[in-house]
Amino acid sequence: MPPTFAQSMITADKVRQCWEDIVESHVAGVAFISVWTAFLDDQQEVRYPAAIWRPVTTGAATTDAHTVQDTFAVSLLFVDQTATDRTATARDKAHDRMDAIARQCWYRFHDLYITNTGVVDGTTLDFVADATPLFTPAYDATDKHLTGVTMEVTLRATPRAICLDDYFT
């Protein structure tokens, strides 16, 4: 029986799942939601603080060893809600707290899937150690007065042999 996509190659849903697991296990009680288009996806009632998952951009490159290396550009918005009449101090505290949570989640990801090799739903996740996340301030976003940081990072998967015969007739 041929393997499923999840068993032999890293896919965007497995990358999302590992981030969801990390975010939801944080002691701050951070909600994990996926919003690609605010008009369509942001209609749900959200509890804050939250990590808002954005669509992953994937790529593939051939290495010097003639293997294929998959890439995943991840963007997560870590935010908390502030009052409409928030002070500068309240804004700063929300930003600082969410920045710390975002970096802690990154450290956990780094430990599980870069320093070590992890498994999500039967798929081995192992990323190259050159990933450098950027944590950009986000404030007064939308009419919900969300404040925090956007974490963006491009992950390169360690090349693995994938038997393409299992996917084609």
Image: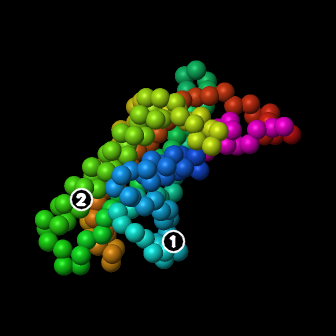
| Residue 63 lies in quadrant | top right
Q: Which mark is residue 41?
A: 1
Q: Position of residue 64 (x, y in %)?
A: 54, 22
The residue type indicated by label 1 comes to Asp
Describe the colour scheme in one phrase. rainbow
Residue at left 22%, top 55%?
96
- Residue 12 visible? The answer is no
118 in relation to 153, above or below: above
Q: Secondary structure at mark 1?
A: helix
Q: Which mark is residue 122?
A: none
92 left or right of 108 in image: left
Instruction: Quadrant for the C terminus, please.
Output: top right
Name the dominant secondary structure of the magenta segment. Answer: loop
| Residue 11 lies in quadrant | top right
Magenta stretch in the rendered image: 1-11
Residue at left 41%, top 36%?
110
Which residue, given by chain and number where applicable, does mark 2 sit on? 95
User: Rounded to the nearest whole Å, what is the CA distance between mark 2 and mark 1?
Assistant: 24 Å
75 left or right of 141 in image: right
